Amino acid sequence: MNGNRGLLIGRMQPVHKGHISVILDTLKEVDELIIGIGSAEKSHTNSNPFTGGERILMLTKALREYNIDTSRYYIIPLEDIACNSLWVGHVKMLTPPFSKVYSGNSLVQQLFEEVNIPVTQPVLFNRTEYSGTEVRKRILNNENWKDLVPQSVVKVIKDIKGVERIQKLNKKEISELV
Ligand code: NAD
């Protein structure tokens, strides 16, 4: 029985307040929500600085900070695969059964719709600021990023020395500069 269980997938590099808003909104529509951490195997690059495990930690702490009932959600890491045409089956293998998907990503929408799983496009909240790209850019440039993510995520990023990591990953080798 798939019941009223939904799936939301995000890379969450890092978890920000837009993700929390969409999770809170979606939980008004479903009994249970599966939250897939996309590209779980990726880390230590400019666009994917955090490991799957670090993102699970951020999300777990943030959902606790917002007092979301732990019996309402499952957090599942989802590695990417080379074949888009097989991806839905890969996701289904790793997740509890679900009957609908929530995603603003057009490839994700397309792949689920092709197998007749309904997809809802969530409303975006303050997308110019609440975006992973914006948070990473501000961290890199020592601008104010802490207001864009939950307090608990600020703490995780501090504990794992995430600011130093993002700034170091962006440094070019001297050989690349000449
Ligand atoms: P994301 O973290 O950018 O966004 C996740 C979701 O959060 C979005 O769909 C959007 O609905 C919501 N969101 C983001 N900002 C918001 C805001 N300000 N307000 C409200 N909602 C907001 O992640 P994504 O790019 O959608 O993640 C898709 C994942 O699926 C990626 O990891 C991708 O690699 C994976 N994928 C893999 C394959 C494959 O392996 N072949 C195929 C398709 C997708």
Image (tube, grey):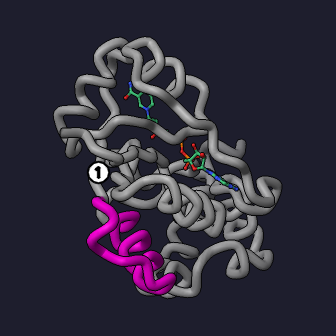
What type is the residue that disc 1 sits on? Pro
Secondary structure of the residue carrying tag 1 is: strand
Please give the range of residues in magenta: 54-74
Rendering coords of residue 149 (x, y %): 62, 74
Residue drawn at (39%, 46%) of the image: 6
* 7 relative position to 45: left or right: left
Q: Is-magenta flag for residue 176?
A: no
Residue under label 1, please give it: 77
Query: In front: 48, or 25?
Result: 25
Q: Can residue 128 be seen by looking at this rendering? A: yes
Q: Is the magenta stretch mostly helix, strand or loop?
A: helix
Image side of residue 56 versus residue 166, left or right? left
Q: In this view, does 117 lie above or below 80?
A: above
In percent of the image, x 34 and y 57: which residue is there?
32
Quadrant of the snapshot with the C terminus: top right
Residue at x 24%, y 32% (from the top left corner):
92
Q: Position of residue 62 (x, y in %)?
A: 47, 78
Q: Which residue is drawn at 68% across and 53% down?
A: 133
| Residue 170: % across, % down | 62, 56
Return the residue nearer the eye: 106 or 157.
106
Asked whether, in this view, residue 13 is left or right of residue 139, the answer is: left
